[in-house]
Image: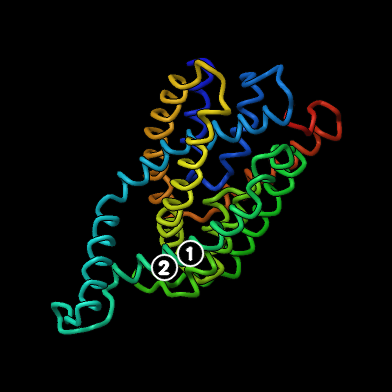
Amino acid sequence: MTIFQAIILGIVQGLTEFIPVSSTAHLVFAARLVGLYNFIEPTLKAEQTTATIAVIQLGTLLAVLIYFARDITNITRGFVRDHLAILTGKNRTDGSRRLSPEAWLGWLVIIGSVPVAVVGLVFKKQIEGTFTKNLWVIATMMIVVGLLLALAEWVGKRGRSMNELGLGDALAVGFAQVLALIPGSSRSGSTIMGGLFAGLTRETAARFSFLLSIPAIAASGLLELREAIHKLPDGTYLPLIVATIVSGLVGYASIWFLLRFLRTHSTGVFVVYRLVVGAAIIFALLGGYITADAG
């Protein structure tokens, strides 16, 4: 991977990780366009591409950690404080033994992260393989999740905010996040969709989606970072660092944009984009202009 390829992949990752249009779909296309890992065996190419994408995602993980630093600090402090109080038999400062909203939000993030962790580990080999780089899969999921997101916009009540999150919301968004393991789905698109179906406001769905992305991105990125040492060719590490930094900077801007956009707009523009891109890929495949495999 060259520095030029790294910058392109970093920009694409940062732009699409938090916008509900599927970062993996765009990265697979970007990798093809810049000729990433060309002229190697397809299965190894798919594994190296997966490892590269997962490592670059650590840049967007850093972006979400910085953007939500205050929230993360409050959640961590409240979680530790309240559970220490429970273990020692002490009341909270307000005299209550109940968990604070911050500690409860911490539990919701943990509970919501379980489904994707379990499914991700069970199907790890398939996720890293050629099937999830197949453009038929990507195009199909671009359209399917786009339609589901449109349906969620239509039927969702969009009436509850962050301080009204419950166990059902965490499970709804958590199981929706499992779809993100299939390229073309979009982690943010799937989780925002789940939040809308659960009755959350658009901004709340997005904020909880970003918080829920932290364990998932950290786990996949760190796991692949360990394996990338053995999978990626020599000379890859400097470009990977560049791509990760670029993705972090662009990702921070993307978070800022989306949260402000969803305060006054629906996800309709992203639905239309997904449907158009998904249909375009299918027509290109049917016309023989592009191949479906990872080559």
What amino acid is labelled 1 in the image?
Answer: Gly
Q: Residue at x 68, y 18 (%)?
A: 38
Residue 264 visible, this orientation: no
Q: Where is residue 60 in the image (x, y as percent from the top left)?
A: 42, 39
What residue sits 56% from the left and 68% below the top? 197
| Image quarter of the C terminus | top right
Question: Which residue is tagged 2?
Answer: 108
Residue lying farthest to the left in this orientation: 93
**Residue pushed farthest right?**
287
Which disc is residue 158 wearing?
A: none
- Left or right relative to 34: residue 97: left
1 on left or right of 148: left
Circles 2 and 1, Cβ within 8 Å, touching? The answer is: yes
For image coordinates 67% across by 45% down, the residue present is 125
Colouring scheme, one of rainbow, by chain, secondary structure, one colour: rainbow
Q: Name the residue under label 1.
A: 112
**Mark 1, residues whose alpha carbon is within 10 Å: few (<14), some, or many (≥20)?**
many
Label 2 packing within 10 angstroms: few (<14), some (14-19), many (20+) = many
* Image position, residue 254 (x, y; %): 42, 41
> Label 2 amino acid?
Leu
User: Which quadrant would the N terminus be assigned to in this image?
Assistant: top right
Residue 123, image x and y in percent? Answer: 66, 51
- Residue 208, placed above or below residue 184: below
Q: Horizontal and vertical percent for residue 252? A: 37, 39
What is the spatial separation of the Cα atoms under label 2 and label 1, in whole angstroms?
Answer: 6 Å
Q: Viewer-proximal residue, 5 or 289?
A: 5
- In the image, is 92 to the left or to the right of 260? left
Q: What element carries label 1?
A: helix
